[in-house]
Image (tube, rainbow, N blue to C red):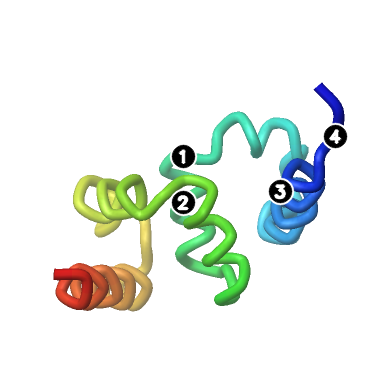
């Protein structure tokens, strides 16, 4: 039940996402990480490190599902096309 190194590292990494959500409390953000709004904001404005951390927390599958179902509506054309190409390339490389 104690706070281990993994938990501290997780909290430290999670806090790197907080600047993207200046208008939300950290606890609320943690509870709703896979919401379309949160995914969209990360894909629109996160830097590479923030994106990497975010994708480790929720997984590529949820991001891909978001892109397929809501990405075109919720992202700018530029961001949607970028992430669509990013994940298409990633899938090809892993095959």
Question: Which of marks 2 and 3 precedes in the sequence?
Answer: 3
Give the Cα distance between marks 3 and 4.
11 Å
The disc label shown at residue 34, or none: 1
Query: Does 41 sit above or below residue 62?
Result: below
Question: Which of marks 1 and 3 precedes in the sequence?
Answer: 3
Left or right: 4 as drawn, with respect to 20: right
Q: Which residue is mark 2?
A: 39
Residue at image position (58%, 68%) is 46
Task: Say which element carries label 4.
Answer: loop
Question: Which of marks 4 and 2 precedes in the sequence?
Answer: 4
Q: Residue furthest top?
A: 1
Mark 1–mark 2 CB contact (< 8 Å):
yes
Q: Which is more toward the observer, 87 or 75?
A: 87
Q: Which residue is mark 4?
A: 3
Query: Does 28 sit above or below residue 48?
Result: above
Q: Position of residue 37 (x, y in %)?
A: 48, 45
Give the Cα distance between marks 1 and 4.
25 Å
Q: Nearer the viewer, mark 3 or mark 1?
A: 3
Q: Position of residue 44 (x, y in %)?
A: 48, 67
């Amino acid at each position: 039940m104690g706070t281990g190194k993994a938990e501290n590292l997780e909290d430290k990494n999670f806090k790197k996402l907080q600047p993207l959500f200046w208008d939300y409390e950290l606890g609320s953000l943690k509870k709703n990480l896979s919401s379309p709004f949160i995914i969209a904001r990360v894909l629109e404005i996160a830097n590479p490190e923030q994106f990497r951390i975010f994708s480790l927390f929720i997984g590529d599958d949820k991001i891909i599902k978001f892109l397929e179902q809501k990405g075109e509506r919720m992202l700018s054309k530029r961001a949607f096309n970028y992430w669509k190409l990013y994940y298409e390339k990633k899938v090809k490389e892993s095959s």
